[in-house]
Image (tube, grey):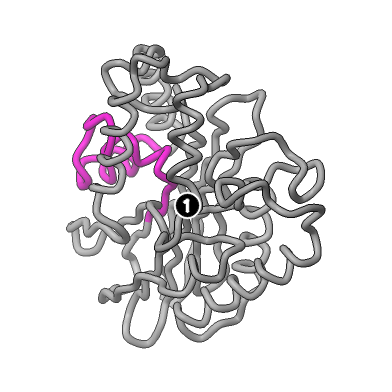
């Protein structure tokens, strides 16, 4: 079996700020990466922001890997990140909050079906025989972030220039030990969550960053199956425009509490070929 590309899309949350998402596929594996927004100015790895740097390094590692399992695929990516960190770092981080971090979800076609591995909160779906199965983490991760944003609403949500209380809160939760994400801290990548599921030629796979999955996990515009069917009927771009319309209608981030008015939104739609 192999992957065939149907559609892909990646939109910056703000056109004035680099997009920290990446997505791609090879013959038998595919991935989506969501860089965690920097909480300070560039300078840690040169002029490029840390999130964009990490997403680009991880994307190159996924692209070039010939790993035979999802576990060794992530091991290849982790080794590539750590080597690039030693090569590209221009100074020490101010604190752990400055560590470049990213979520990632990858899938691989193997002899037993589809292998799934993830670090963080990217989302995937398998459509097989008319049924839709969610791949990756449960949506509670996203709910927790919304609750935290709501608790800080009085300090102003959605502004590109964060208030001091919001920035302090974000820094306090960033880079803590025990996280499972792509990172320059090997401890963050030591345990990759994984699963497996049967698949067949003709099945379809969707991978998306949480910015695109906000349609279901934050805004409840669809449930999982309805989102997949809407994408199949209307395409990724039409659903992305619907996503942005919801966000524009709630520019103050009061109906749907969130730290950014719009997040980077990326999705990859593949079909499994025989």
Quarter placement of the C terminus: bottom left
Q: Relative to 62, is 116 on the left or the right?
A: left
Q: Which corner quadrant of the image does residue 116 belong to?
A: bottom left
Q: Which corner quadrant of the image does residue 218 belong to?
A: top left
Q: Residue at x 26, y 38 (%)?
A: 216
Q: Relative to 259, is 54 on the left or the right?
A: right
Q: Between residues 64 and 229, which one lies in front from this camera angle?
A: 64
Relative to residue 122, is residue 271 depicted above or below?
below
Where's residue 237, x and y in %? 46, 33
Q: Residue at x 53, y 29 (%)?
A: 13
Relative to residue 112, is residue 125 depicted above or below?
above
Where's residue 239, x and y in %? 38, 32
Quarter placement of the N terminus: bottom left
Q: Is residue 161 magenta?
A: no
Magenta range: 206-235
Q: Between residues 128 and 176, which one lies in front from this camera angle?
A: 176
Secondary structure of the residue carrying tag 1 is strand
Q: Between residues 91 and 110, which one lies in front from this camera angle?
A: 91
Relative to residue 254, is residue 80 depicted above or below?
below
Q: Relative to 91, is 240 on the left or the right?
A: left
Q: Residue at x 32, y 79 (%)?
A: 113
Where's residue 195, x and y in %? 30, 74
Alpha-carbon neighbours of circle 1 within 10 Å: few (<14), some, or many (≥20)? some
Residue under numbered circle 1: 6
Q: Relative to 262, is 19 on the left or the right?
A: right
Name the dominant secondary structure of the magenta segment. Answer: helix
Where's residue 80, x and y in %? 67, 71
Q: Is residue 229 magenta?
A: yes
């Amino acid at each position: 079996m192999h992957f065939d590309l149907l559609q892909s899309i990646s939109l910056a949350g703000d056109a004035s700020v680099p997009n920290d998402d990446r997505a791609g596929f090879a013959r038998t594996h595919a991935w989506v990466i969501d860089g965690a927004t920097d909480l300070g100015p560039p300078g840690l790895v040169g002029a490029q922001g840390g999130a964009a740097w990490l997403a680009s390094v991880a994307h190159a590692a996924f692209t070039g890997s010939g790993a035979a399992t999802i576990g060794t695929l992530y091991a290849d990516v982790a080794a590539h990140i750590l080597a690039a960190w030693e090569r590209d770092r221009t100074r020490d981080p101010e604190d752990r909050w400055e560590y470049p971090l990213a979520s990632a979800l990858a899938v691989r076609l193997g002899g037993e079906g589809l292998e799934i591995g993830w670090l963080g909160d990217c989302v995937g779906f398998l459509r097989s025989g008319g049924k839709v199965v969610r791949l990756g983490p449960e949506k509670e991760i996203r709910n927790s972030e919304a609750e935290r944003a709501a608790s800080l609403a009085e300090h102003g949500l959605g502004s590109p220039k964060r208030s001091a209380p919001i920035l302090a809160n974000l820094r306090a939760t960033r880079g803590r030990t025990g996280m499972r994400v792509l990172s320059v801290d090997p401890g963050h990548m030591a345990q990759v969550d994984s699963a497996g599921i049967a698949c067949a030629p003709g099945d379809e796979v969707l991978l998306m960053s949480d910015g695109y999955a906000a349609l279901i996990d934050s805004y409840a515009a669809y449930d999982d199956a309805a989102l997949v069917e809407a994408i199949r009927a209307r395409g990724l771009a039409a659903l992305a425009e619907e996503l942005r319309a919801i966000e524009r209608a709630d520019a103050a981030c009061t109906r749907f509490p969130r730290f950014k008015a719009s997040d980077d939104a990326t999705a990859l739609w593949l079909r499994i070929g025989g």
